[in-house]
Amino acid sequence: TYALLKHYLKSRKIPVARLKQFKPPMAMMSLMMLELKRLGMAEIGVDMFFNQKALAENKKRLHLESIEKQLTILENMGKGHADDLVLSTLKDLKKLAAEMDELKNAWRSGDLQQLEEIGIKPFRSEHPSLYQLMLVERNNSWIPMIESLLTTVEKELVLVGFLHLAGQEGLLAQLQTHGYQVTLF
C-alpha cells in the first residue's frame, strides 16, 4: 500500500513528507482536494457562496453538526482499515475527473436517480460501514433539525452535500416518508 501511495505521490510531484504528518483519513482527504484543485474543480462551492452571502447580509446561520462532529467522523474513517482506505482512495482518484463531471451534471439537472447510480450505489456496496457513518447516520441525525426548521414562519435554506439528498436513506426520501411534499425544480 505504501509503495502504491509513494508511486502516486511521485506521479503528482507531491513530497511524501507533505502527508506524513497526517493520519490516513486526513491524508486521503488532502489528496482528494489536491486532485480536485488540479482538475480545476475546487472553485468556490454552493455552500461557500451562500455562506458569504449570508455573512454579507448579516443573516443568521445554523449548522446541522459541529466542526468537532465532522472531525470525529473524519478521524474514524477507515479506522482499523487504513490500507483499504488508502487503496480505495487511490482507485477513486483515477476516475475522479469523469465521475465528478457526471455527478455535477446530475446535480445541476436535479437527477436524483443518476446521483444515486453514480455516487451512492458504488459507495454503499464498496464501503458499507463508511456509507453508514458518512451518509445514513448523519442524515438520520439531521432530519429532526430540518423538521423543526419547517415549523417556523421564517424561510430557511438548508445546504448539504448532494449525496445526502438522493437514495432511500437520503434526506428528501426521509422527508417524504415523514409526510412532507418534496418538489424539485
Image: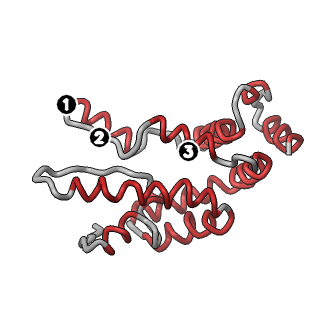
Q: Which residue: 63% across, 59% down?
A: 129
The quarter of the picture where the C terminus appears is: bottom left
Q: Which residue: 84% across, 37% down?
A: 6
| Quarter of the view holding residue 45 | top left
The location of residue 138, given as percent across then percent down, is: 46, 54
Q: Which residue is mark 3?
A: 73
Q: CA distance from mark 1 to mark 3?
A: 30 Å
Q: Which residue is mark 2?
A: 62
Circle 3 crowding by C-alpha within 10 Å: few under 14, some 14–19, many from 20: some
The colouring scheme, among rainbow, by chain, secondary structure or one colour, is: secondary structure
The location of residue 17, given as percent across then percent down, is: 78, 24
Specify the amino acid type for callout 2: Leu
The location of residue 122, given as percent across then percent down, is: 63, 67
The location of residue 171, given as percent across then percent down, is: 38, 63
Circle 1 crowding by C-alpha within 10 Å: few under 14, some 14–19, many from 20: few
Residue 13 versus residue 118: which sits nearer the camera? 118
Q: CA distance from mark 2 to mark 3?
A: 19 Å
| Quarter of the view holding residue 147 | bottom left
Image-based side of 170 in relation to 2, left or right = left
User: SS of the residue at dot 2?
Assistant: loop
User: SS of the residue at dot 1?
Assistant: loop
Q: Which residue: 27% across, 38% down?
A: 61
Specify the amino acid type for callout 1: Asn
Q: Which residue: 25% across, 36% down?
A: 54
Q: Which residue is mark 1?
A: 58
From this view, report whether residue 15 is shown above or below residue 178: above
Residue 115 versus residue 127: which sits nearer the camera? 127
Image-based side of 96 in relation to 69, left or right = right
Image-based side of 167 in relation to 183, left or right = right
